[in-house]
């Protein structure tokens, strides 16, 4: 009985973890995507170096990295290694990397 219960508990935890991961996915609406792309083109920034940070979705940038506002969008951006990076300002996590 204990073995059966443990397997059920493990399955539940796996499914719960998958739900949490899915909840963290950020979806940028096409209208916002257009606003962001156009604004970033019109407001180019100098590229900065952030040693030891890989530009991957979910990577947290150090608090010392200055984020720049995109009007009417809750996300911020910065240019790192000549790539525009969209960041969630509350967590400093990268949500999109533009080439």
Image: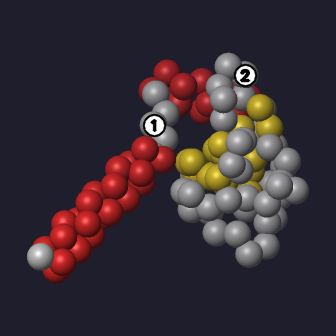
How does the figure colour the protein chain or chains? secondary structure
Mark 2 lies on residue: 71
User: Is residue 94 placed above or below 33 in the rendered structure?
Assistant: below
Image location (x, y in percent) of residue 62: 79, 60
54 or 74: nearer the eye? 74
Q: Report crowding for label 1: few under 14, some 14 to 19, many 20 or more residues within 10 A (C-alpha).
A: few
Mark 1 lies on residue: 27
Q: Quadrant of the N terminus?
A: bottom left
Q: Answer with left or right where residue 83 lies relative to residue 4.
A: right
Does the CB distance between marks 2 and 1 fall below 8 Å? no
**Which quadrant would residue 32 be assigned to in this image?**
top right
**Looking at the image, which residue is at 49% across and 33% down?**
28
Q: Answer with left or right where residue 95 lies relative to residue 69.
A: left
| Among the two numbered marks 2 and 1 on one chain, the one whose residue lies closer to the N terminus | 1
Residue sticking out furthest to the bottom: 3
Residue sticking out furthest to the front: 1
User: Is residue 82 placed above or below 95 in the rendered structure?
Assistant: below
**Is residue 38 visible in the rendered structure shown here?**
no
User: Is residue 47 placed above or below 50 in the rendered structure?
Assistant: above
33 or 27: nearer the eye? 27
Q: Secondary structure at mark 1?
A: loop
**Looking at the image, which residue is at 65% across and 25% down?**
73
61 or 12: nearer the eye? 12
């Amino acid at each position: 009985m204990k073995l059966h219960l443990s397997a059920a508990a493990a399955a539940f935890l796996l499914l719960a973890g998958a739900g949490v991961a899915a909840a963290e996915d950020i979806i940028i609406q096409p209208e916002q995507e257009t606003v962001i792309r156009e604004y970033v083109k019109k407001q180019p920034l100098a590229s900065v170096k952030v040693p030891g940070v890989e530009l991957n979705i979910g990577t947290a940038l150090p608090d010392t990295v200055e984020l720049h506002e995109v009007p009417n969008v809750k996300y911020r951006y910065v240019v790192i290694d000549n790539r525009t990076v969209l960041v969630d300002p509350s967590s400093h996590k990268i949500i999109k990397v533009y080439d």
